């Protein structure tokens, strides 16, 4: 076990050093974008929107820097990491003209409501009451960057929506592998495959309280299964923006469905 820990720490140090060297090399070739600046960013549907650059990181698989952006006026669920090729200056005349033409199109009130719902347009702080606005600002500051883009859960690869406070370097991985039975999280696929061959769990711990077809609901005591409940809270936070996360789960019951 000690040899494994030393190896993982050594691999981590080498990876961090390599990433830093490659990022410095690329920055010499291509100027880095300023954090906090606004640019026009192309979304996956080909539409251009004004967005703020929140963070930057070097992507090993791409061999290039990528940027975490927030689309102005949209729910943070749509924040994403994008390559430099999808980002243009806010002074780009061609893009600005396209946006101008789109904004001049007349839409009815009902069409606007549907557009906002589909694109998850969120309220501005000015539209909130002072207390809600203050809480929202504090929450946003703590959960601003979502490093975990996706998870492998059993045979499914799932895109995540929000930040979750996974510990140490686990929370900075682009992808986590999570056991579908015990919810243990891992950084590497090889570790996940080895764990899967050894894991004896085949259902959530606790008492099954409901079953219909392929759906089951289990009641799990947080005091008796503390680690499982902590892992469940971390997993849930990836998809729930305002879920409160507590490491002390001994006093709670968790309903788990599958």
Image: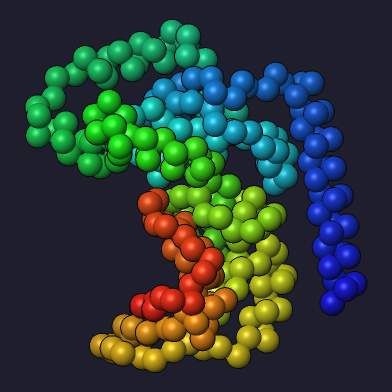
Which image quadrant: the N terminus?
Answer: bottom right
Residue 143 appears left or right of 192: left
- Please, is residue 255 above or below residue 79 in the view? below
Which image quadrant: the C terminus?
Answer: bottom left
- Please, is residue 26 above or below residue 189 in the view? above
Residue drawn at x 60%, y 28% is 84
Note whether residue 163 is visible.
Answer: yes
Note whether residue 204 is visible.
Answer: no
Exactly how many numbered labels are in the figure?
0
In x, y percent, where is residue 123?
A: 27, 33
Q: Nearer the viewer, residue 217 or 100?
A: 217
Residue drawn at x 42%, y 57% is 244
In x, y percent, where is residue 48?
A: 40, 25
In x, y percent, where is residue 147?
A: 58, 47
Residue 36 appears left or right of 116: right
Residue drawn at x 68%, y 42% is 59
Residue drawn at x 30%, y 39% is 132
Q: Nearer the viewer, residue 119 or 83?
A: 119
Q: Nearer the viewer, residue 206 or 46?
A: 206
Residue 194 appears left or right of 209: right
Q: How is the image coloured?
A: rainbow
In x, y percent, where is residue 204?
A: 46, 84
């Amino acid at each position: 076990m000690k040899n494994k820990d030393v190896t993982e720490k050594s691999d981590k140090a080498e990876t961090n050093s390599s990433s830093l060297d490659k990022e410095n090399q690329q920055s010499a070739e291509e100027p880095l974008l300023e954090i906090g600046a606004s640019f026009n960013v192309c979304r996956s549907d080909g539409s251009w929107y004004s967005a703020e650059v929140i963070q930057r990181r070097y992507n090993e698989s791409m061999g290039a820097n990528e940027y975490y952006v927030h689309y102005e006026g949209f729910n943070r669920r749509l924040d994403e990491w994008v390559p430099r090729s999808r980002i243009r200056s806010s002074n780009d005349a061609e893009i600005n003209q396209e946006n101008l033409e789109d904004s001049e199109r007349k839409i009815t009130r009902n069409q606007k409501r549907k557009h906002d719902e589909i694109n998850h347009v969120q309220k501005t702080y000015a539209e909130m009451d002072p207390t809600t606005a203050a809480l929202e600002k504090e929450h946003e500051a703590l959960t601003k960057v979502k490093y975990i883009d996706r998870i492998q859960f059993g045979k499914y690869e799932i895109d995540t929506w929000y930040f979750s406070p996974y510990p140490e370097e686990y929370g900075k991985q682009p992808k986590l592998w999570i056991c579908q039975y015990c919810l243990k999280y891992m950084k590497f696929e090889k570790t996940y495959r080895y764990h899967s061959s050894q894991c004896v769990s085949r259902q959530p711990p606790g008492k099954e309280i409901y079953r219909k077809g392929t759906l089951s609901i289990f009641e799990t005591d947080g005091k008796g299964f503390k680690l499982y409940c902590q892992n469940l809270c971390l997993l849930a936070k990836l998809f729930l923006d305002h879920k409160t996360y507590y490491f002390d789960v001994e006093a709670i019951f968790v309903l788990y469905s599958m």
